[in-house]
Image (spheres, rainbow, N blue to C red):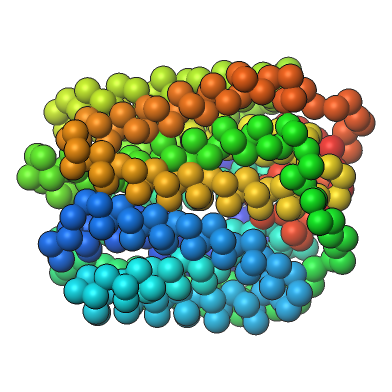
Amino acid sequence: MAAGYLDILRARHAARLLTGTLVGRLPNGTASIAIVLFVRAEGGSYSIAGALAAVYGLATAVGQPLLGRAVDLYGQPRVQLPAAVVSALGMAVLALAGTGSLPLAYAAVAVAGLFTPPLEGGLRALWPSVLGGEERVHRAYAMDAVAQEVMFTAGPLLVTLLVALWSPATAVLVINAIGVLGALSVVLSEPSRAWRSAPREAHWLGALRSPGLLALLGSFFFVGLALGSITVAAMAYADDLGRESVYGWLMAALGLGALIGGAVYGARQWAGAPERRLRVIVGLLALGYLPLVLTPGPVAMTVLAAVSGVFLAPAVACSFIVVDRHAPRGTVTEAFSWLVTTFGVGAAVGTAVAGPAVELGGTAWSFAVAGAGGVAALLVLLATGKVLVAPPRTAVAVRGSENDRNGAVEPGFSSGHQA
């Protein structure tokens, strides 16, 4: 697998596009952590921190499909870079104005989230033209997923380092400035400037007419809720210890666990129906979240955080295959967009619920929100088992759609659609 990754990175433009995309997505990948740290430094409550992070998450969930459609219509440079600049300006307003005026703070994070550039989808749209062969494109999707987990592992550490060296406000400003530079690197590249979307046919119901897809979306709303609640719960745990750095370590451990799980899962082929496999993976994911309620010492808690993240990336990767099998023909991209949006909304709700949970019952209660989210996600999959039986059809290999925002094809699998 390592040799295959090196082969991809040697392709012209590949390393630049991957690096630029990861750097450009850094503000989005660290936004919740940066917002929580900033609000706490300003003297705000957990409820305010959670609510601001939730508004950012909800705005991002709304903005991503809208900006993705704009990219399809007008090209990457005309949308990605202006969106990155506006998003950074929104976070700059938050950092400079503080939380003295809550309406302004909410408006600032809403703008920042709404205009978060869809760089991830843009990269997956570029891979076919950059790499050519189907096998190399599929391997690039796997490499992209692993690289993102590296970002989610290193990002929290970078934020906490900037906070330790300067201040939370400086961390917000620096992270978002770096993000604009990443977006700039991508849109100035030849593949991004030359890319054009293929024509698409829309339907008023689209992907949502699939009962199986609706069941999956219901489950992943709760997976997102579980993940979002951990952002606030980990901060509360660090505050209990009086050691702010513990928060970064917990979030980094969560990302490291997902990185390891994703790398192992993507390195082999899996037999059997992905719907059945997804139920097992989500069950293990829920099992990993439950011990966090014990809130042991920082070393043991960091280990538990890493374990809780192991099955997150495999669950997401497997969900891509399930989406592909259940989305009506011609709606695969829309179906993936709904998955991303539902997950984001769930994460936003999780951050909003965890804040009051801390204040009402303490840190353990906020981690209990994560455990309950994982269990609810499993129960949805179990209750909808009959509709989560994919209709029989002949699988055909996808040769990389420029509109696929989520890497529809899992390594070792074929897709049931042409996007």
Does residue 15 appear left or right of residue 231 in this picture?
right
Quadrant of the image occupied by residue 204: bottom right
Residue drawn at 80 percent across, 27 percent down: 390
Residue drawn at 84 percent across, 59 percent down: 202
Quadrant of the image occupied by residue 380: top right
Judge by depth and name the residue closer to the eye, 357 or 160: 357
Please say if 404 is above or below 376: below
| Percent of width and height locating residue 9 | 61, 56
- Look at the image and tell me whether residue 41 can be seen: no
Please say if 415 is above or below 197: above
| Percent of width and height locating residue 239 | 13, 45
Residue drawn at 80 percent across, 51 percent down: 206
- Look at the image and tell me whether residue 203 can be seen: yes
Residue drawn at 49 percent across, 35 percent down: 222
Does residue 405 appear left or right of residue 185 in this picture?
right
| Percent of width and height locating residue 234 | 25, 41
